Image: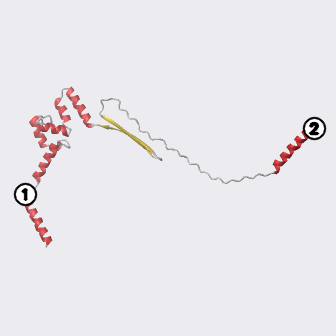
Amino acid sequence: MKLLVAILLLFGTVATITDVKAETNTVSSNTVSSNTIDKAPPSAISPGISIVNSDVCVSAYSGSVTTQILGVSTGVTVSDSNCVRIKLSRQMMSLNLKVPAVAILAQDPQVFDALWMSGVYPPIKGKIAEESKEIWLANIDMMPEGSKIKNKFLQNREKEKEPEGDFDGLKNFGLMALSLLLLF
């Protein structure tokens, strides 16, 4: 019986092997695939601008923008001129140099106007009080830009340069005559 089982087993194995070799299996497939990679660009990170000392007249600003193609970041520091002016004036006062301290502050148009309006004329060329007023009036262009006092003096200077009122009357008469001629 063992022999019979062995023969059947051998015969079955041979039949299976020949069977597999005899068949041809063809598989065809048409597959279209597309791979979309959805990856965002790296972020643009603003630089950290550190101003360590609190006694500094500088402000720091930074910003960044990121698009799908490009990222840009930048940072700047901006100096505050009024803060610098106050610190310089404070230093002059600590050295007991009061006139230069006031002269530094008077470079600001608001301080200049306040001094002028109070009758304490800003120092110029080493002169103070009425002597400085005369120098300022002779040199109006040296007054700080944005000063209301300077603008007032410049407007008065322009009014002095304008011709007398008789010319204005003659000009108005000429315009009226011209408009009457155009009407007819």
The residue under label 2 is: 3
User: How crowded is the residue under tag 2: few (<14 C-alpha within 10 Å), some, or many (20+)?
Assistant: few
* Distance between mark 2 and mark 1 Cα atoms: 145 Å
Q: Quadrant of the C terminus?
A: bottom left
User: How crowded is the residue under tag 1: few (<14 C-alpha within 10 Å), some, or many (20+)?
Assistant: few
Residue reaching furthest to the bottom: 184
Mark 1 is on which residue type? Answer: Gly
- Residue 12 figure quarter: top right
Q: Is residue 42 left or right of residue 162?
A: right
Where is residue 124 drawn, in percent x and y?
15, 37
Which is more N-terminal, label 1 or label 2? 2
- Circle 1 SS class: helix
Where is residue 62 drawn, in percent x and y?
38, 39
On screen, 181 above or below 151?
below
Where is residue 165 drawn, in percent x and y?
7, 57
Where is residue 183 drawn, in percent x and y?
14, 71
The residue under label 1 is: 165
Q: Quadrant of the N terminus?
A: top right
Q: Is residue 153 left or right of residue 2?
A: left
Mark 2 is on which residue type? Answer: Leu
**Tag count in the figure?**
2
Residue at screen point 17% across, 38% down: 112
